[in-house]
Image (spheres, rainbow, N blue to C red):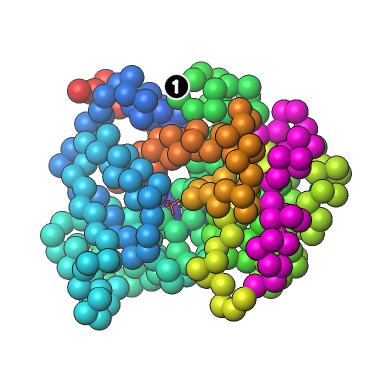
Amino acid sequence: MKHLLSTADLSRIEAIELLDTAEEMSLVSTREVKKLPVLRGLTVVNLFFEDSTRTRISFEAAAKRLSADVITFSAKGSSVSKGESLQDTAQTLSAMGADGVVIRHSGSGAPHRLATSGWIDAPVVNAGDGTHEHPTQALLDAFTLRRVLAGLPASGPADGARGLALDGAVVGIVGDILHSRVARSNVHLLTTLGARVVLIAPPTLLPIGADTWQCDIAYDLDAAIAEHSFDVVMMLRVQQERMQQAFFPTAREYARRWGLTDTRARALPAHCAIMHPGPMNRGFEIGAAAADSPRAVVLDQVANGVSVRMSVLYRLLTGQSAAAGGREGQS
Ligand code: CP
């Protein structure tokens, strides 16, 4: 694995190895072990052409906990506003020294372009590109789900999840699938790991071709909750900033029919966890009671994001697939 651009590129074995290494890294993420020296002397460049809170900060934390130097670039306030291209920006940052590049961009395919153009010679990690993919989000979702299914704490150090896949798990992904890179990456990864995925959305918020994806599709959330014994429902943010025109349904209609209201949350199976990639629109796609309920693992997802991104950076920058021996040199 030279780059991480899409979860479709991961085999089941590679995905499980990344999750297993993330389990090792969770010891560092929770500060039980302070820092690993495995990327000492290497530089990770974070190129953020689009806003982010969770992904940008957790990639920074991940790289620092592996002892890498980190350069973070945000398009806002940069020479991008003067018209500088992706190529020139990437090559400028690369000239300062980059052993790995993490990129978020509003253009679907920008990470792929960076990885295959020859502009830079470093592993590229897709941190979310347009409506296309967000592979590390799917990995942290799978990591969290694997913990939940095993009856383990959803985040923090725990023994018992290593080697496990997600065979037999039933996952509902609800909402604005049309604009969701999270949904696309999750459909690839969760099905590779053996889960069954049901997409539930208004017909207007499903992408053309979704019926060819390896998942089921439903339009009625109440009927889907009654029909499927979901192990997790993943509520998606309605991405109003990507809407080309006034969208149907209206916000009010959407919240009523596809939002995880308190009543609807109570109708979920007792064991069902609630996920959201964040940022949440409370009162729109998810009610406050559901978002703050004990079955919500939203903050566990955030915590696990650091471990998963450590695993990805470790794998890409060292070529190794497990953290074996990493703890020997802890500082
Ligand atoms: N889930 C996610 O990508 O959040 P940010 O946009 O805050 O990075």
Position of residue 308 measured from the top left corner of the image (x, y, whole percent):
43, 39
Give the extent of the magenta segment: 247-274
Dot 1, how many residues are within 10 Å of its Cα: few (below 14), some (14-19), or many (20+)?
some
Q: Position of residue 95 (x, y in %)?
A: 14, 64
Residue found at x 18% / y 38%: 40
278 vs 126, left or right, is right
Q: Residue at x 56, y 72 (%)?
A: 243
**Residue 135 at x, y percent in the picture:** 49, 52
> Does the magenta segment cover residue 273?
yes
The residue at the point 68 percent across, 38 percent down is 232
Front-most of residues 270 and 188: 270
Is 305 situated above or below 24? below
In the visual, does 185 lie left or right of 59? right
Q: Is residue 285 above or below residue 204?
A: above
Q: Is residue 112 above or below residue 227?
A: below
Relative depth, front residue between 295 and 197: 295
Q: Which residue is mark 1?
A: 157
